[in-house]
Image (cartoon, rainbow, N blue to C red):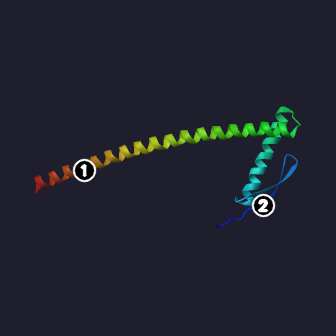
Amino acid sequence: MEMTEKNKIEVNVFGQNYTLRGEAPPEYLNRISLYADEKMREVSKEYSIVSSTKVAVLASIHLADEIFQLREEVFHLRDEVFQLRDELNKISNDLEKRSKNLIEIIDRGLEIEG
């Protein structure tokens, strides 16, 4: 069985140091920890909370809300893509029929002339 190498990075989130390990690149791990820190600081400032546990819970709720909204947007966009694909197929089929009709008209015109 092949083992994937885990990346290890030291981060600071809301004043606490953590060691993150994961298969993602260290730059990505750093970005997500900075985002988590940013969200926790926003919550702490907005609600004037100093308890890191309460801040973490509220920040996780805010992040869950972002995830749910983004999922809804993805589903909506996916539906739009499917609808546009169907419209494109209809247009393509119509264009193919019109092209065949045009070729038949041209062929008939050539037969009359010839």
Position in image of residue 8 (x %, y %): 78, 61
Q: Which residue sits at x=78%, y=36%? A: 58
Q: Disc 1 marks which residue?
A: 100
Q: Disc 2 marks which amino acid?
A: Lys
* 75 left or right of 85 in image: right
Q: Which residue sits at x=59%, y=38%? A: 72
Determine whether the residue tagged by mark 1 lies in a helix, strand or loop.
helix
Position in image of residue 42 (x %, y %): 81, 39
Q: Disc 2 marks which residue?
A: 8
Q: Earlier in the sequence, mark 1 or mark 2?
A: 2
Mark 1 vs mark 2: give the one in front. Answer: 2
* 114 left or right of 58 in image: left
Farthest residue, direction front = 1
Determine whether the residue tagged by mark 2 lies in a helix, strand or loop.
strand
Disc 1 to disc 2: CB gap under 8 Å? no
* Vertical arrangement, residue 9 with respect to residue 68, above or below: below
Q: Quadrant of the C terminus?
A: bottom left
- Closer to us: 113 or 79: 79
Position in image of residue 15 (x %, y %): 88, 47
Position in image of residue 49 (x %, y %): 87, 34
In which image quadrant can residue 65 be found? top right
- Closer to us: 65 or 42: 65
* 71 left or right of 87 in image: right
Q: Which residue sits at x=75%, y=40%? A: 60
In which image quadrant can residue 23 be found? bottom right
In which image quadrant can residue 4 be found? bottom right
Q: CA distance from mark 1 to mark 2?
A: 62 Å
Mark count = 2
Q: Quadrant of the N terminus?
A: bottom right
Mark 2 burial class by Cα count in 10 Å: few <14, some 14-19, many 20+: some
Q: Disc 1 marks which amino acid?
A: Lys
* 89 left or right of 10 in image: left
